[in-house]
Image: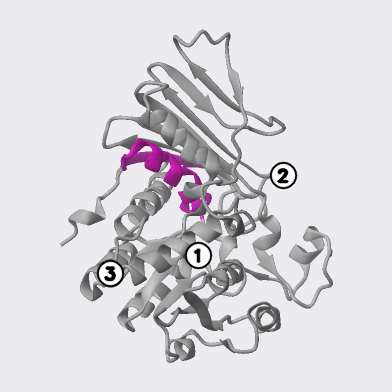
Amino acid sequence: MEKPLRVGVVGLGRGLGLAKQFHALPDARVVAGCDQNPKRLPRAAEALGPDVKLLDSYEDMLKCDLDAVLVASGGPDHGAHGIMALESGRHVLSEVPAEVSLDQAHKLVAAVRKTGLKYMFAENTCYWGYVREYQRQVQAGRIGEVLYAECEYVHDTRTLAVSNPGLPPGTPFEEVLRHPDTRKTWRATLHPVNYLTHDLGPVLEILDDRCVSVVCMSTPPAIGEGFAPAAEAALFKTAKGRVIKFLMAKALPRPAHHWFVLMGTRGSIESPRGPASKHLLYAEGENMDGWSEMSWTSRNLQGPRQALASGHGGADWFITREFTDCILKDTPPPIDVYRAMDYTVPGICAVQSAAQGGAPVEIPDLREQS
């Protein structure tokens, strides 16, 4: 066998989970990692072993002998770190969102084009078992032509919006917030709708569509002045004429959930919401007396046994496996840079709409950039 794909990881928080999956593959290996938070390095060393070079500088990591870089740093840095990796001659696997600036999104696409290297977007929800099942049902025509969809992501991340390593674990959030040494993290000012790819991505994948315009409205911040809105709601029009409604609430007290609805000309599919535990299917003409409960789950059963043990319903194994394959076999990435922009740029444009009081904003197709 040829030598394993040599991977470097920037961001050893979320990045550590995917790094361990690379380590579990027979033809990939993490050889270096970096994080500006030195407290993450010992945990990474324990998880990845003594042969992995761990650094506190991304620039220094890029001097290592690498084939590819997993970008799992703070969300607003993903585009810049991806461009740096590409320009240094490395393929890129990027965590979500791909970028939060339209200008930087254009630069990222330009870097992929210029270098000819692989760029794959690590959107884990597209690999969930029930998302793949929804796609099969839609492609089979069981609910007819889908004309309307809803998706939402509720996740109370207030405690992640601030950081104070000097306080003991479990310190009440309000006390952390008042402490003079507490600092905001990147999550404090990131608009909720910038983090829409977990939900908009699967819907666009199921429907084989892209968004062309958006209107969006924001709530006030829940934490205090200087923080991002607590929630944002957006309406998207797609290239195929569909309407998609998206909601994200990131600073309101409610248990976390993802939720999807697909409404077609012959039926509907709806995922569990709140305390509900079953996926629902209604297919007109199939002698259904209302909704039928389906036993679909997020677990993706299409892979090997080790995939089931990986994170995010088995998605982490699929992401690292398919990224490694697209490089070693020189095949197109499953979620390439253009599809990454289809998932990401609608959120950037939604922020622009909200800033204009909900005015419609056109969403560019970055395939067409010069």
Q: Position of residue 136 (x, y in %)?
A: 42, 34
Residue 253: give its label: 2
Label 1: which secondary element: helix
Q: Residue furthest left?
A: 370
Label 2 or label 1, whichever comes before in sequence order: 1
The residue stretch that appears in magenta? 191-218
- Locate residue 13: give its quadrant: bottom right
Label 3: which secondary element: helix
The residue that appears at 59% across and 19% down in the rendered structure is 292
Which tag is nearer the camera, tag 3 or tag 1? Answer: 3
- Residue that label 3 marks: 112
- Locate residue 337: give its quadrant: bottom left
The residue that appears at 72% across and 44% down in the rendered structure is 253
Q: Position of residue 215 (x, y in %)?
A: 38, 38
Label 2 or label 3, whichever comes before in sequence order: 3
- Pick the residue in front: 309 or 203: 309
**Amino acid at dot 3:** Val
**Amino acid at dot 1:** Gly
Q: CA distance from mark 2 to mark 1?
A: 23 Å
Q: CA distance from mark 2 to mark 3?
A: 40 Å
Q: Position of residue 7 (x, y in %)?
A: 47, 78
- Residue that label 1 marks: 75
